Image: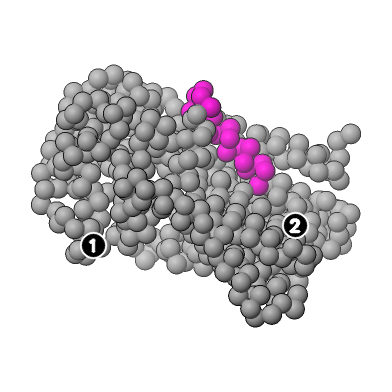
């Protein structure tokens, strides 16, 4: 019998809600350019390409392995990753319900815990997580780690082992998005405090802390070792740890403030609930503070960068949902969900208007043709046309955000199609300019300014086709003098 008091009933409800919220996006290849690129890299990884070597990006390799795993199943790659993301979002929401249930003083009424899970599913849509953004996958690991940490602080049994499991999950999340480190620091300090309250000696505390730090760093160290063994250690270090210092922020102070205010405004109902539940939700508030610190340090205020915030924010809001009566709780939950649904509807309409839809991408692919002449150079456009192999020429260069040769290439958000045609007309001309300029960039990635290092990361991948082709595996090479190049800043 279906009942919200049973975990199976809660799981079914959350799955149905997740499908209802996310199914309108199924099959849309342009939900966001980031996940298009992840799908592209995951597909090429199965054909022998190495992230950071053959395809440049700053995201950890674990994210690309997820998409490679999805592509290995077969089927429509776009639909498959969106279905997988829906299942992962549902699992995360279920973990949110479990966490709130642990924090709540009244386990008999599941409305607050299930309500927090529903809030999570709605707010990830608000924060531009309708598809397979990195935080959708990372949040699942973070939620599982939070549940382990909570159990450790309450049970005081197997603290070392449970703590190691939690920090290993944090380490895996860091291989999806490195900013998970900040929340991991909070979890680690919470574990140390729990061990201290258990009466452990300084020596034992030190040993536990070392174990937990090692568990968190293990996945990244393993990835580094694999790359170093293959002779790509320098590429791994540069992409993962150094290139971020060459990132350029095009936003002004006023635009950053507007974005920040927009994110805060959409979070106000949840912040109000979190404040109401501050007495029982101190853990959630500390976790939320760590996520906010990560956003402020990274200085990125687009809504999609608030996706990691949606997890602790939903948990904290769940602790403040419960009222003196069930009716009060239901009214609070309904009001918050209506606000979130309206915000999600408005933001989704704006995003589709700016990014286009599947029909427009099909027209773009048709315009490119099966065998375009010359080098296909795509700047500021969607990477999804590069995904289906038949439309790829022997040599393609994709520059979605890096500085362009003339700085005037149209944005991919141009709904009229003029932007796409401008990119198409300029491919060969701008590719020639980029290669000519690349020969004048400094060769040492450790020398010069941060802007120089970013220029080198672009120039190195475009200046010498012969060398690049030699570095690709034979199965990934079409001819000795041609290559496909994918760059993402």
Labelled disc at residue 100 = 2
Whether residue 426 sits left or right of residue 90 in the image: it is: left
**Left or right of residue 48: residue 145:** right
Give the SS element for disc 2.
Answer: helix
Residue at the location (42% across, 43% down)?
34
Asked if residue 57 is positioned above or below residue 182 in the image, the reply reads above
Residue 119: % across, % down:
68, 50
Q: Residues within 10 Å of mark 2 (few under 14, many from 20)?
A: many
How is the structure coloured here?
one colour
Few, some or many residues within 10 Å of mark 1 (<14, 14–19, 20+)? few
* Front residue of this view, candidates 170 and 419: 170
User: x and y percent of residue 88 in the render?
Assistant: 62, 41
Q: Mark 1 — residue?
A: 446
Q: Main secondary structure of the magenta part?
A: helix
Quarter occupied by residue 38: top left
Q: Which residues are magenta?
A: 73-92
Looking at the image, residue 359 sits to the left or right of residue 141; the answer is left
Based on the displayed image, in which of its 4 quarters is residue 39 positioned? top left
Question: What residue is at 80 percent from the left and 39 percent from the top?
Answer: 8
Whichever of labels 2 and 1 marks the residue nearer the N terminus, that label is: 2
387 or 313, which is in the foreground? 387
Q: Is residue 27 visible?
A: no
Q: CA distance from mark 2 to mark 1?
A: 47 Å
> Residue 90 in magenta?
yes
Q: Position of residue 366 (x, y in %)?
A: 32, 20
Q: Nearer the viewer, mark 2 or mark 1?
A: 1
Residue 184 visible in the snapshot: yes
On the rendered image, what quadrant is the N terminus found in? top right
Q: Residue at x 66, y 62 (%)?
A: 163
């Amino acid at each position: 019998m279906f009942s919200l008091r049973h975990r199976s009933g809660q799981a079914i409800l959350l799955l149905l809600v997740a499908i209802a919220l996310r199914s309108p996006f199924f099959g849309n290849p342009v939900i966001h350019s980031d996940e298009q690129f992840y799908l592209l890299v995951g597909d090429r990884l199965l054909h022998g390409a190495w992230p950071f070597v053959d395809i440049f990006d700053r995201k950890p390799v674990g994210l690309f392995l997820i998409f490679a795993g999805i592509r290995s199943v077969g089927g429509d790659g776009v639909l498959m990753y969106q279905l997988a993301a829906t299942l992962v979002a549902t699992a995360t929401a279920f973990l949110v319900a479990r966490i709130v249930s642990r924090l709540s003083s009244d386990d008999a009424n599941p409305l607050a815990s299930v309500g927090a899970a529903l809030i999570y599913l709605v707010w990830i849509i608000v924060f531009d997580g309708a598809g397979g953004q990195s935080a959708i996958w990372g949040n699942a690991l973070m939620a599982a780690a939070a549940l382990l940490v909570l159990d450790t602080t309450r049970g005081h049994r197997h603290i070392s082992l449970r703590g190691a499991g939690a920090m290993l999950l944090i380490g895996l999340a860091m291989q999806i998005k490195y900013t998970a480190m900040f929340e991991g620091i909070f979890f680690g300090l919470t574990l140390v405090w729990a061990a201290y309250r258990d009466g452990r000696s300084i020596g034992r505390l030190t040993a536990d802390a070392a174990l937990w730090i090692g568990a968190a760093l293990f996945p990244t160290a393993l990835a580094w070792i694999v790359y170093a063994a293959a002779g790509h250690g320098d590429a791994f270090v540069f992409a993962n740890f150094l290139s971020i210092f060459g990132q350029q922020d095009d936003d002004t102070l006023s635009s950053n403030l507007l974005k920040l205010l927009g994110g805060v405004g959409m979070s106000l109902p949840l912040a109000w609930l979190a404040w109401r539940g501050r007495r029982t939700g101190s853990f959630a508030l500390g976790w939320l503070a760590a996520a906010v610190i990560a956003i402020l340090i990274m200085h990125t205020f687009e809504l999609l960068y608030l996706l990691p915030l949606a997890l602790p924010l939903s948990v904290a809001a769940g602790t403040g949902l419960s009222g003196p009566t069930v009716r009060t709780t239901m009214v609070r939950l309904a009001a918050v969900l209506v606000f979130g649904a309206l915000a999600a509807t408005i933001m989704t309409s704006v995003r589709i208007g700016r990014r286009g839809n599947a029909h427009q991408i099909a027209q773009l692919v048709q315009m490119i043709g099966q065998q375009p002449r010359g080098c296909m150079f795509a700047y500021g456009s969607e990477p999804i046309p590069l995904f289906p192999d038949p439309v790829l020429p022997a040599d393609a260069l994709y520059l979605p955000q890096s500085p362009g040769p003339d700085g005037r290439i149209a944005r991919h958000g141009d709904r009229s199609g003029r932007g796409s045609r401008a990119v198409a007309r300029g491919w060969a001309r701008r590719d020639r300019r980029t290669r000519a300029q690349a020969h004048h960039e400094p060769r040492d990635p450790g020398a010069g300014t941060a802007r120089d290092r970013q220029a080198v990361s672009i120039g190195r991948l475009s200046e010498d086709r012969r060398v690049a082709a030699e570095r690709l595996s034979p199965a990934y090479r079409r001819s000795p003098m041609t290559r496909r190049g994918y760059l993402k800043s």
